[in-house]
Image: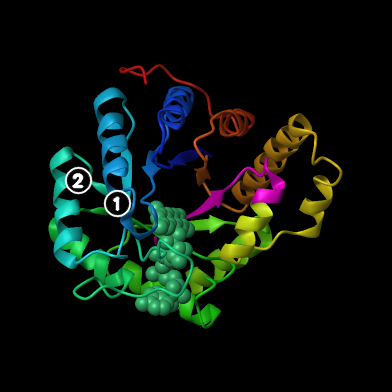
Amino acid sequence: MSLAVSFEFFPPRTEEMEAQLWRSIARLAPLNPAFVSVTYGAGGTTRERTHSTIKRMLAETDLKPAAHLTCVGASREAIDEVVRDYLKSGISHIVALRGDMPEPGPYSQVAGGYESTPELIRGIRKAGVLEISVSAYPEKHPDSPSVEHDYALLKAKIDAGATRAITQFVYDTDAVLRFADRAYREGIRVPIVPGIMPATNFKGVVRMAKRCGASIPDALARKFEGLDDDLETRRLIAATVAAEQVERLRRHGFDAFHFYTLNQADLTFAICHLLGVRAQPTAKAA
Ligand code: FAD
């Protein structure tokens, strides 16, 4: 069964980070991903950087970029203008999100802003974007009152026009399998693409997982025990664990995976290689 991969990047803050990002893009672009996506900082704080990163991808590579966009901190008019601008630049795939506030705390909507992700999706569709990806949470979103609410919201996002659901990173593979089964029973028919985060900086991953409600299986934690000062071994283990996770999901019928690269190429490249994804010549060198 063929395998589609996609890669997520974040817009760089400094020149050094920019150089790192473009080294990673140059390494990963020949793997011919289905798409690459660029995040939108909490509260829209990276609007310009997200946009310029994507424009450069379009100009200098053969990649098919998707722009993340959130409801936070902007009026409908401002968001609609960003969408029109993306369309004018040739970007026809948006990852539509509610988003998080720039400072930790409960979500609040600005006056005149989009009230919810389904509404944002309707706005994006109306502007003429046909490919719209959304988030999904196999282990429940921390703000969600219940698992049932999460399925209902995902269904509402799809009914509004979303064409793909990308999951939060999950290390408990059984949770992804249960989620996909139930999503199907709930009438969700768009592709569900598991989010894969290679766990090199294990302590950092544990912190991040706590914030977004993802669990860390004991068996995974044990694999990283005693390796705090041994980056090389952690990297080897992270690649193996992620490749095993993808292989298991593949055996259950998943054929597309979204890698949270954190702008680092090596692990994602190694995992893709283990999975049989090989570099191909590209018309434009990244
Ligand atoms: P939704 O799926 O719309 O909702 C998630 C939960 O929040 C639901 O339980 C819902 O009930 C609750 N909720 C929705 N609206 C409200 C409200 N008005 N008041 C209270 N609760 C509400 N974040 C960024 O800032 N930038 C990014 O680029 C980005 N990219 C992401 C990509 C992926 C694939 C994923 C999985 C997440 C990403 N995030 C990003 C994180 C995301 O913004 C947060 O998880 C955010 O808290 C929820 O946004 P959402 O679109 O997933 O929300």
Q: Is residue 212 above or below residue 29?
A: below
Q: CA distance from mark 2 to mark 1?
A: 9 Å
Say whether residue 167 is magenta: no
Q: Which mark is residue 94?
A: 1
Find the magenta span and give its range: 186-204
Q: Residues within 10 Å of mark 1 (few under 14, many from 20)?
A: many
The quarter in which the C terminus is drawn is top left
Q: Is residue 140 above or below residue 191?
A: below
Q: Nearer the viewer, residue 95 or 14?
A: 14
Q: Residue at x 36, y 66 (%)?
A: 98
- Where is ligand 1, by quadrant? bottom left
Measuring from the top left, give residue 55's x and y in whole percent.
25, 34
- Give the residue pinned by disc 2: 86
Amino acid type shown at disc 2 = Tyr
Q: Quadrant of residue 267?
A: top right
Q: Are marks 2 and 1 in contact (CB under 8 Å)?
A: yes
Q: Of helix, strand and loop, which one carries label 2?
A: helix
Q: Residue at x 43, y 25 (%)?
A: 19
Q: Is residue 2 above or below residue 177?
A: above
Q: Residues within 10 Å of mark 2 (few under 14, many from 20)?
A: many
Q: Nearer the viewer, residue 127 or 70?
A: 70
